[in-house]
Image (cartoon, helix red, strand yellow):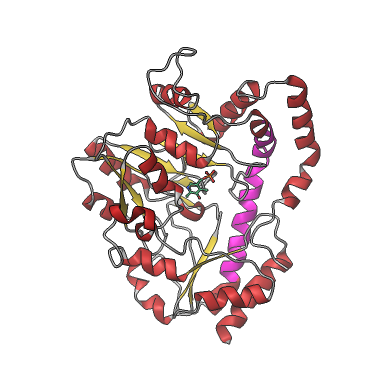
Amino acid sequence: MVPLFDPNPQNAALASGLREAFDSLLASGRFILGPEVEAFEREFAKRIGVPYAVGLSSGTDALLVALMTLDLAPGDEVICPSFTFFATAGSIVRAGGKPVFAEVLPGTFNIDPADVERRITSRTRAIVPVHLYGQAADMDPLMEIAEKSNIAVIEDAAQAFGARYKNREAGSIGTFGAFSFFPTKNLGGLGDGGLLTTNDAALAKKAVILRNHGMDPKYYHQTIGGNFRLHALQAAFLRVKLRHAAGWIEKRRQNAAFYLRRLQQSATGCKSPNDSSSNAQCYEKPILLPHEHADCDHTWNQFTIRVGGGRRDHLKAFLAERQIGSEIYYPCPLHLQECFLSFSEGKGSLPITEAIAGECLSLPIYPEITDAQLASVAEAVGQFLQS
Ligand SMILES: *Cc1c(COP(=O)(O)O)cnc(C)c1O
């Protein structure tokens, strides 16, 4: 049996440290913000190489708070990819903005800067690139577009803790970096948690005020915030886990290298999945493998292949029969979600996104997966392709 993800071996190995963190917090009685949250923020900021980190209740709330600092007016537009998790665009609407969905690049699954540039208008206030599956979006052209238009860039780094772009940390490049500590992420907590990173002191202060009802000073409110606080207990657990995170990412990289070696043979002809011109030709090939872009240190939060010829769901079922977990991240792009249809040009408007949504399948790659399990997944995929 190979589950898609299993949090237990990682946490079991750290059980005594996690119990100590719990005992110490229990004894302290400091459950809301306080020293554990402050210490975690300091350690996380240092790890990312930014001066400010603000602990928040989830990755979703990190995106929401970042967008709330922009004070969006009705009609203000925020550009994001359509091929991402719901929260990316859900937060834009909740903050009062209008999501504008951009196309992704077929090789990296990340937002296409040229398409972003085409969608800039006088109402555009921000870009939210997503570092999907653990690999950074192409930040240089995005930052250039943002600087030219004088708009913010909020990196959705929920899946990309530890990723690098041209030797800079994901989440340290834009106006804000939004992180998630959902258990499946690269730094997974024991529950929900999130965080914003920024280089801007004024914006960091604004985020700190917004996460606590917009209160400043106590019981006085110039702005409407919410309760977006990171739990002190979660911060205490995350401090224990942060010390080990680099090793887990290294394991993910090794696991990806293993799959790439093993599956290369099955995926004959798909040698250059990074070549965007190869998009058409992938439909003739059995599968298209993901790859690490030359500018990026991929963290492989997900290992996502493309299965052509309408066979993706068959492969998922074939793996399930062999008790191998897999998942479709994401089957319905955001521009086709019912709740976003009023912001969308509908079916056919983002053809690359729509093609990927019909072909993508993520395989188990969590750090503690065994070599035997990895081999059995690769073997099953190979068998399917020969069947
Ligand atoms: C997980 C995720 C989020 C939301 O994070 P939560 O902590 O679950 O709220 C946002 N964006 C992306 C791309 C994600 O993968």
Q: Place residue 320 in its image quadrant.
A: bottom right
Q: Quadrant of the C terminus?
A: bottom right
Q: Is residue 179 magenta?
A: no
x 62%, y 51%: residue: 250
Instruction: Name the outermost residue toward the right.
Output: 16
- Residue furthest bottom as drawn: 387
Above or below, comparing residue 287 to residue 111 in the picture: below
In the image, 88: left or right of 188? left
| Residue 99 versus residue 221 in the image, above or below | below
Residue 20 placement, left or right of 68 = right
How many numbered callouts?
Answer: 0
In screen coordinates, is 44 left or right of 36? left
Residue 27 visible somewhere in the drawing:
yes
- Give the magenta range: 236-261
Return the x and y of residue 139 as percentages of the image width and height. 37, 46
> In front: 370, or 260?
370
126 and 93: which is toward the camera: 93
Q: Residue 8 in the image: x percent, y percent?
A: 74, 51
Residue 111 showing in the rendered view? no
In x, y percent, where is residue 309?
A: 44, 80
Q: Residue 372, position in %: x, y?
A: 73, 68
Image point (61%, 78%), residue name: 318
The residue positioned 41% from the left and 67% from the top of the image is 356
Assess whether residue 255 is covered by the magenta stretch: yes
Q: Main secondary structure of the magenta part?
A: helix
Placement of 280 over or under 88, stated as above or below:
below
Q: Quadrant of residue 188?
A: top right
Q: Image quadrant for the N terminus? A: bottom right
Q: Residue at x 78, y 46 (%)?
A: 13
Between 85 and 214, the one lying in front of the other is: 214
